[in-house]
Image (tube, rainbow, N blue to C red):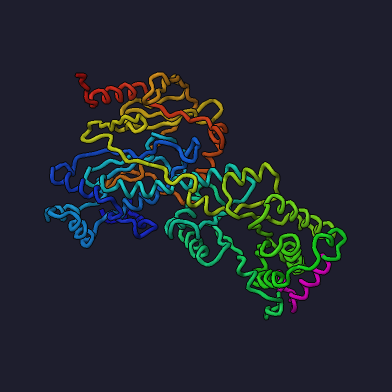
Amino acid sequence: MENGSELGQIIDGPTNPMVTPLLNDLYQFTMAYAYWKAGKHNERSVFDLYFRKNPFGGEYTVFAGLEECVKFLANFKLSDEEIDFVRDCLPGSEEAFGDYLRGLDCSDVEVYAIPEGSVVFPKVPLMRVEGPVGVVQLLETPFLNLVNFASLVATNAARHRFVAGKSKSLLEFGARRAQGPDGAISASKYCYLGGFDATRQLKGNVGMICNVAAGKLFGIPLRGTHSHAYVSSFMSTDEIVDKVLRSADGKTTCEDFVSHVQTWLKKIQYSPSLSGIFSETNQSELAAFTSYALAFPKTFLALVDTYDVMKSGIPNFCAVALALNDFGYKALGIRLDSGDLAYLSREARNFFCTVERELKVPGFGKMVVTASNDLNEETIDALNKQGHEVDAFGIGTYLVTCYSQAALGCVFKLVEINNQPRIKLSEDVTKVSIPCKKRSYRLYGKEGYPLVDIMTGENEPPPKVGERLLCRHPFNESKRAYVVPQRVEELLKCYWRGSADEAREELPPLKEIRDRCIKQLENMRPDHMRRLNPTPYKVSVSAKLYDFIHFLWLNEAPVGELQ
């Protein structure tokens, strides 16, 4: 099979060119060598990729990163230079091992996965990887790397969307605070997947480069305005050389837009309802706003807190917006990046509504108010409780760094080799693996909500609609319940079948994955979704698989002896 070919199509390599077979822990190569040395490297193995606990104190997770895993599989190949380096890292390794590595690809690997963007739960395999143990072992670290952060940040984005509500716009502002370029670009992609509306550059060149790169790579909507530096770079309106503004319909031209803005500022100052709010505004700020509006008359949005929001920023913005309105342009709104966001957003909205009423400008009161400044789930929840007039939230550091939880903790465990089920035991029962090749189903109740996910042995008959089924906790014998599903959904689908010509799932575009995520989150029972004390979602196994788990456990666990 040629690299990247899938049913005659070419699959691009991973987004990050650093994702190669060398993106691996050394012990994966030491195991590969030991498998090869023992003649076990071609034994058929089955591994499950799953996580043990939902992040952020919640009861759900969004699965992301599958597309990058498939791209990695399709292009898996070690170069001669990489093989030489691996052998240098394994002193004493035989030359024939290099020949083995040279011939490695994923043409005999199969991957079954839950569709990307799905809501998922602990213990249920996100991916089942089957193939020769020598090559599948080399997939562990790259797959975990590609899934862990992607799923964590997508879940973080979904949680922010939940607390903000459907009606608010959410903008990812995190490029400059992310962990390196890959962290920034990955965060932009997976925040969009998790329900954010756009990635946006608001603060300086580094942010713009990273976010624009994500927009180019993934087709994510981009938005941008200016920073405090742009505002403070102006000293007066005398610096504006080109003062000409052509009307939106192209029929008229304003030769001195600066004077037109200043005329409107005076009208606002002398308005009976607004005169007591401010007197003289900062003229360098007015110059910056005017200059920016001349550059972007169709998308004018101003950062209004460089000097004083209510005494300068808002009046100056209104003067420029009203001047633009005279020539057929509609300003977008403002951004608040400091201060009491609830209070300032309400005051700004009152100011806009007064302008609309006093100066007879329809729609002016509906200007968009965007808020930023180290926002997170807690601050947005607090703003909701205080009452605010914010239309869009720009969220950065806490979002892209997943500040409240560093990692998801996905694991990659061998569950079968040569058709023999295997189990990993531990004194910590949460770390005991669920053996054998399995099938996974989601069972839905009468109200349309998911009730429980259930794992069965590969050859067990699937659950049937309307048929009573016993669902058991994998390890706690007292936790069990009968379920009569109204709908049954099989979760694992084939996304890679190596060189076989059988049909497999296509990789959907990012927008479709995002739509799946949003739809699934909306279809979850509200008590599973709430921020505080959410109800745990039930994950179970069939009665037959439960019995087999405990049979194998007893069979593999050594029997102690008391002296």
State the residue in front, 187 or 342.
342
Whether residue 112 sits left or right of residue 37 in the image: it is: right
- The relative height of residue 171 versus residue 55 in the rendered view (above or below) is below
Tell whether position 376 is magenta.
no
55, above or below 282, in the image: above
Please report the residue visible at 81 percent of the width from the left and 60 percent of the height from the top: 277
Residue 189 vertical position relative to residue 543 in the rendered view, above or below: below
Residue at the location (84% across, 62% down)?
275
Start-end of magenta stretch: 246-268
Q: Position of residue 121 (x, y in %)?
A: 44, 35
Residue farthest along the right direction in this orientation: 272
Q: Quadrant of residue 51?
A: top left
In this orientation, which residue lies closer to the viewer: 244 or 423?
Answer: 423
Residue 69 visible to an observer of this rendering: yes
Quarter-wise, where is residue 181 in the image?
A: bottom left
Quarter of the picture holding the C terminus? top left
- Check if residue 248 falls in the magenta segment: yes
Which residue is found at the position 80% from the left and 58% from the top? 356
Residue 47's spot in the image, x, y percent? 29, 39
